[in-house]
Amino acid sequence: MKILKLKEQIEKYIPYNEQEASDKELMLEYIDKFEDVLTRKNKMCHFTASNWIVNKDRTRVLMIYHNIYKSWAWTGGHADGDSDLLHVAIKEAEEETGLNNLKLLSDGIYGLQILTVDSHIKRGKFVSSHLHLDCCFLLEANEKEKLRIKKDENSGVKWVEIDKATKLTNEEKMKPIYSKLNSKLKTIKTQC
């Protein structure tokens, strides 16, 4: 089964902090409990892939203005049946920003988090509150590469100073996640 490879990646992942350790445990439980966590058919929880896209100097991060959440955010999207979350993450980053030359900096998953999603309207349909079982990947992009907005999902794409990412987002729940990703980046800076 295709979920087994993802389960193995999550099992091997070494949590960075208490939040990741707790979320890792729950993700593994959900994989064992539900057959459909790779699709939105599971209306309670499903997998997503996100990106922390940094420049070569690791001083800036690329963010999009997310139309549904009305906030500056990372790129990413739903697995929609694809258990190769790195593939999902890169595809979403390219679609949402116009970038074509992304480089993976982390050895697989860079961050784990379970995110609450409030109910909202998407493409004219009501979506109930649910959980995103998110695997984040660390990518590098060239700041000079041309950016493009994906109008049906975002209304802005820009590079920001890495330490300003937490101040830029309107989503309070994302501030500790972005802070974690930045802190972790400082610990692996020399390895990248």
Image (cartoon, rainbow, N blue to C red):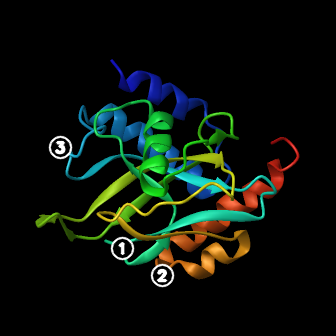
Q: Which residue is mark 3?
A: 41
Residue designated by label 2: 170
| Residue linked to disc 1 | 69
Q: Residue shown at 55%/66% (left/top)?
A: 63
Q: Image quarter for residue 110?
A: top right
Q: CA distance from mark 1 to mark 3?
A: 21 Å
Kindly state the secondary structure of the residue where label 3 is placed. Answer: loop
Residue 166 in the image: x percent, y percent?
61, 75
| Left or right: 126 in relation to 106 | left
Determine whether 177 is above or below 29 in the image: below
Q: Is residue 16 left or right of residue 84?
A: right
Q: Position of residue 120 (x, y in %)?
A: 22, 71
Q: Quadrant of residue 41?
A: top left
In the displayed image of the protein, which residue is found farthest to the left?
125
Task: Report whether 3 appears left or right of 192.
Answer: left
At 61% from the left and 41% from the top, the residue drawn is 101
Count of residue discs: 3
Callout 2 amino acid: Asn
| Amino acid on which the number 1 mark rests in the picture | Tyr
